[in-house]
Structures are given as structure tokens and as C-alpha cells.
């Protein structure tokens, strides 16, 4: 099933009740779950949460292997927007071994799963509102159930970028770190802008309006130049 996931829907919590995204470590390149352990954990979670109707797992949901022209378009359109899933749906963090704690993509996904978008940008989700469920498949890895929230639950954007840039956080393609961390900082701006535009639209639709314009604006002649973007931001 194809669904359109939008930033507006993500920030409004539209997808949390019925959509689950799996965050997990691929066991090998050709088969991310050769023993079926992560699939079994996902099934168990779904049985406990019958309200979930849609599940996103990257291996079957993104085109793999040899890609035709359409597959390439789909893949390179979806991949840069994966953050929307981890930021705006319920997330199941499935840990089979400690490698989950050492990889760039899994740690970035975990960090997103503890965030929510507000007027202040990406902030920590209150504990009672968290969308993330952590499952440790093997008993010896149970300590990671606490380690993940301890590391990421209250971690700011700047601190997350600092930690994820560390050399011990491994990634196949080092350029992924540069691109994704740059995009993460840009996302802060987009989230704030969304709420500013939403507030402006609400005001224009009948919300509270200032009774008088600032004097310096009222004194401008009719032929004054159009305000710059900086002027508009200052007014907001």
C-alpha cells in the first residue's frame, strides 16, 4: 500500500495511532533478518496493538537490488524523507545485538523517535507521550532498553549532531553523516517555520489582530519598497 506522509501530518500526530515503523539493524547485506527474530518481535508487537494498520520496514518497502528506472525514482525520493516516519509514526526499536547502539542510521532513527515538533523546533517528547517501544530480542541485551532513552530521550539537536558525528558511530558511507546531520539542522528551521505559518494563517482567519500598526510602519510613504524577508521575520 502506498501512502503519502507529509510534514503537516507528522507534526499533527496524524499517523501515530495506526502506523508503525521498524528501527532495526540489518544482520547482513542481502538478508537483514535471516533468523526471523526481528520479524517475530514485530508480529508480537502487532498482536498487542491491533489498532496498527500499516507497517513500514525498509527492506520490503524500499526497492532493493537491481532497480529499474521507476525503482530508482521511488528509492531516491523516499530515502531522503525517511525521517518523517521516525518523527511522525509509532516506532518499534528492535535490538538483536549491541550493533544497534554503534551504527549511525539506527541511532539517528532512535533519536527521531524521542522527538516531537513544536514552535521551539524538535524537542523531547514527554515520557507519557512517547511513540517509541524498545524490544530486546535476547535477554543479555536487556540493558539497552534503558541505554537508548538515557542517550537520546533528552538530547538536543546540537548534542545529537555532536554525538552522531563521533568516529565510533559507524556508517558504510561517511558522506551519509555529513548530509543527514546538515539536513537535521535544516529540519529545525522547517519545523519552526511550519508553526509560524500556522499561527499566521490562524490570525488571518479571525484570530487576534493588533489594534494599531507600529508607528514606523504607519509613517512609511505609499511608495516605500516592499519589505524584505528579514523585515517580515522581525514583524512576526
Image: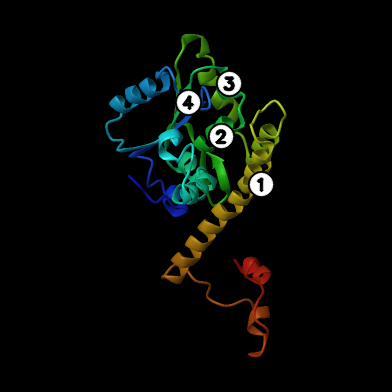
Marks 3 and 4, the one that precedes in the sequence? 4
**Can residue 174 be seen at all in this image of the molecule?**
yes
The residue under label 3 is: 99
> In what quadrant of the picture does the C terminus appear?
bottom right
Image coordinates of residue 119 in percent, x first then y, are 54, 52
Q: Which mark is residue 32?
A: 4
Mark in the foreground, 2 or 3:
3
Q: Residue furthest top?
A: 140
Q: Quadrant of residue 56?
A: top left
Q: Given contact means CB atoms under 8 Å apart, are the residues at marks 2 and 1 in contact?
A: no
Mark 2 crowdedness (10 Å alpha carbons): few <14, some 14-19, many ≥20:
many
Image coordinates of residue 50 in percent, x first then y, are 27, 31
- The secondary element bearing badge 4 is classed as loop
The residue under label 1 is: 182
Distance between the Cα atoms at labels 2 and 3? 16 Å
> In what quadrant of the picture does the N terminus appear?
top left
* For residue 94, above or below residue 56: above
Marks 1 and 4, the one that precedes in the sequence? 4
- At horizontal 66% and vertical 28% (from top left) the residue drawn is 169
Distance between the Cα atoms at labels 3 and 4? 13 Å
- At horizontal 65% and vertical 42% (from top left) the residue drawn is 181
Distance between the Cα atoms at labels 1 and 4? 28 Å
Q: Given contact means CB atoms under 8 Å apart, are the residues at marks 2 and 4 in contact?
A: no
Q: Quadrant of residue 63?
A: top left
- At horizontal 46% and vertical 25% (from top left) the residue drawn is 31
Amino acid at each position: 500500500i502506498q501512502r503519502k506522509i507529509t510534514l503537516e501530518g507528522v507534526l499533527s500526530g496524524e499517523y501515530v495511532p495506526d502506523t508503525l515503523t521498524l528501527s532495526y539493524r540489518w544482520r547482513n547485506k542481502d538478508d537483514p533478518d535471516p533468523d526471523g527474530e526481528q520479524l517475530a518481535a514485530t508480529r508480537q508487537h502487532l498482536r498487542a496493538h491491533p489498532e496498527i494498520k500499516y507497517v513500514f520496514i525498509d527492506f520490503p518497502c524500499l526497492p532493493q537490488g537491481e532497480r529499474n528506472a521507476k525503482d530508482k525514482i521511488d528509492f531516491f525520493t523516499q530515502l531522503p524523507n525517511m525521517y518523517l516516519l521516525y518523527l511522525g509514526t509509532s516506532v518499534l526499536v528492535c535490538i538483536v545485538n549491541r550493533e544497534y547502539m554503534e551504527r549511525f542510521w539506527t541511532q539517528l532513527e532512535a533519536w527521531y523517535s524521542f522527538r516531537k515538533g513544536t514552535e521551539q523546533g524538535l524537542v523531547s517528547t514527554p515520557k507519557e507521550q512517547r511513540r517509541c517501544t524498545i524490544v530486546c530480542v535476547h535477554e543479555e541485551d536487556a540493558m539497552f532498553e534503558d541505554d537508548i532513552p538515557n542517550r537520546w530521550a533528552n538530547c538536543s539537536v546540537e548534542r545529537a549532531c555532536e554525538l552522531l558525528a563521533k568516529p565510533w558511530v559507524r556508517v558504510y558511507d561517511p558522506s551519509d553523516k555529513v548530509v543527514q546531520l546538515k539536513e537535521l539542522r535544516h529540519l529545525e528551521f522547517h519545523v519552526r517555520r511550519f508553526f509560524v505559518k500556522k499561527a499566521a494563517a490562524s490570525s488571518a482567519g479571525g484570530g487576534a489582530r493588533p489594534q494599531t500598526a507600529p508607528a514606523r510602519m504607519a509613517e512609511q510613504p505609499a511608495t516605500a519598497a516592499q519589505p524584505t524577508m528579514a523585515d517580515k521575520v522581525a514583524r512576526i
